[in-house]
Image: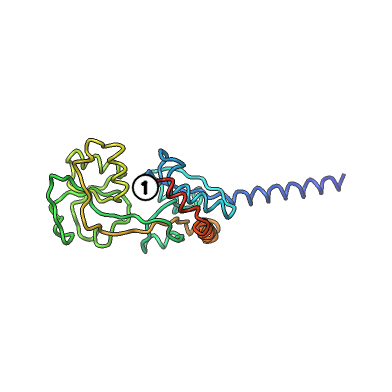
Amino acid sequence: MKSIKNFLLIFTLISLSLGANAAEKVISLTSIEFPPYHSKDLMNHGPVTELIITAFERVGYRVEVAYFPWARGEYLASKGDKYHGVISIWYNKNRDKKYFFSDSYMDNEIGFYKRKSNIIQYSSYQALKKYTIGTVIAYANPPGFDSAQLNVKPMVTDMLNIAKLCEERIDLVLIDKLMAKHLLSKTRKKCHDQVDWMLPALEVKPMHLAISRKAKDGLKKVNAFNRGLKLIKKDGTLKSILKKHGF
């Protein structure tokens, strides 16, 4: 009887250990609606989601993704408990205090969209003081933008900013170029020919996966992703994913 009890105890301990190891192999990430890069409405949730899942799978991890508005999702990710990190984020020094950043996997071109009927030229932020500019709450804006004390109208999503631009409620939107094109073509088709991209772009921002410094084995998880990313780059899988999604 004693040997049976010992066997059951050992079996239970092994089962608990396997369960714990399995849990550690799951990466929970927050995301936002950021088409054409990642969105619930895109094939495989978009190229970013697909490449991140694929890279992690190559090194033995499973990924779970939950969608939130940016400020909420970033807050939950930074806590590092229920969610380990965020699926795509731009680097800055303040965020470096909260996250381990992965190698970059794509770039965002950030600048302004305006209505064609509104003639706007600028060589510095100071030339934009008389205009109303739509931004998104808690985004990392280009260098000098926040300190320029412009007339900004923060919103919770880029889609709301595009809607306000089309309805002539703001003059400019600070936004990723490809995202603006996607939103205009999918949700504001009548407005598509009434707005345009302003040159020059303000900044090209590399996109990163980020894992909270509070998450268990956070650096280990980021390093695992970097290994997987190198593997899918080397064998052409990353290029194939991007091509499939039109990039």
| Other-residue count near label 1 (Cα within 10 Å), few / some / many at <14 / 14–19 / ≥20 | many
Quadrant in which the N terminus is drawn: top right
Toward the viewer: 191 or 223? 191
Is any part of residue 218 visible from this angle? no
Residue drawn at the location 46% of the way across and 60% of the way down: 102
Q: What residue type is labelled 1?
A: Trp
Q: How many numbered circles are shown?
A: 1
Relative vertical location of residue 186 with respect to residue 80 in this rendering, above or below: above
Q: Position of residue 235 (x, y in %)?
A: 53, 57
Toward the viewer: 238 or 220? 238
Q: Which colour scheme is used?
A: rainbow
Residue 230 is left or right of residue 33, and the answer is right
Q: Where is residue 77 in the image (x, y as percent from the top left)?
A: 45, 51
Residue 165 is left or right of residue 3, and the answer is left
Secondary structure found at label 1:
helix
Q: Mark 1 points at which residue?
A: 70
Residue 80 is left or right of residue 150, and the answer is right
Q: In which quarter of the image is residue 35?
A: top left
Q: Where is residue 90 in the image (x, y as percent from the top left)?
A: 37, 57
Residue 4 is left or right of residue 173, and the answer is right
Is any part of residue 145 visible from this angle? yes
Q: Quadrant of residue 169?
A: top left
Please identify the residue farthest to the bottom as the structure is shown.
Answer: 93
Please identify the residue farthest to the right as the structure is shown.
Answer: 1
Residue drawn at the location 44% of the way across and 40% of the way down: 43
Q: Where is residue 66 in the image (x, y as percent from the top left)?
A: 46, 43
Toward the viewer: 205 or 29? 205
Residue drawn at the location 21% of the way across and 42% of the way down: 165
Residue drawn at the location 31% of the way across and 37% of the way down: 186
